[in-house]
Amino acid sequence: MKRWMSLLLAAVLALSAAGCAGEQGETEQASAQAEQQTEETGETQQAAESEQTEETEQPAEEPAADMEQPAEESTETEAEQPAEETAEESSETGAQSNLLVAYFSYAENAALPDDVDASASASIQPWNGTLTGNTGVVAAMIAQASGADLFSIRTVEQYPDTYNATIDQGQQEQREDGRPELAAHLENLDNYDTIFLGFPNWWGDMPMALYSFLDEVDLSGKTVIPFVTSGGSGFSNTIRTIQEMEPQADVQEGLSIGASSATGAQEQVESWLSELGLA
């Protein structure tokens, strides 16, 4: 009996030891699996963090590149566009002269027939395809050499078709201190700083149409440069008259040309303008 009990006790102890060993093996296996899962989780997390880091850095580079390109384009646009506008503004300003040649010429104010013989009168000159007088020829030369605009002072009532009859009418107007009505009026005077004022010498004075013109305009602050064509009297007292009528203008001495020399005065005109710094 005692021997049987001893064998039974030994069997129980053996079974108990085997169970403990199984449990320990399972525990170690579970622990190993847990460690493996932990390592895999760590690797997965590390990979996820690495990918997240790459995704975060990549967009940071792209906007930087996008910002640089528009900045360069914007700089070029801002630098070039005003230059083109300025260049365009400088061109428009240059196209409009600040010089004006205002003049009175007999042939442009006379009722000349279509078949007039210009060679029969020293006061009628063909020039640039039109008929004008000596003063008109010099006016055209000044405008061509200086780039000035031209304004022909013309009267509503035209003068006779012969020079002598015109001189008689001019004398009558002087005696009456008349002011012939003008057919055209200068409306853009503010555009000009310098006015060349041309006329023939009629009986020691300007034609009265010049008085009408000077009554209409205000040349204050402007430079007035007279020029005259005459048979030898030059300006007579006309410079003083212009100064009295335009006291706030800078009236200069001007240029006097003999009527018989008008068509050959190109070189004289250009030399004169060069001395004035206007050619």
Image (tube, rainbow, N blue to C red):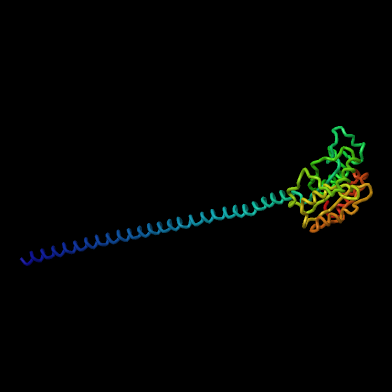
Q: Position of residue 122 (x, y in %)?
A: 92, 40
Side of 93 relative to 210 (left or right):
left
Foreground residue among 45 and 182: 182
Question: What residue lies at 27% left-to-right and 60% top-to-bottom?
Answer: 30
Q: Position of residue 183 (x, y in %)?
A: 77, 43
- Seen from this angle, which residue lies furthest right? 232
Foreground residue among 91 and 63: 91
Counting labels gives 0
- Seen from this angle, which residue lies furthest bottom? 2
Side of 92 relative to 209 (left or right):
left
Quadrant including the N terminus: bottom left
- Seen from this angle, which residue lies furthest front? 176
Residue 3, picture quadrant: bottom left
- Seen from this angle, which residue lies furthest left? 1
Foreground residue among 40 and 218: 218
Q: Position of residue 221 (x, y in %)?
A: 77, 57
Side of 153 relative to 10 (left or right):
right
Q: Position of residue 172 (x, y in %)?
A: 87, 45
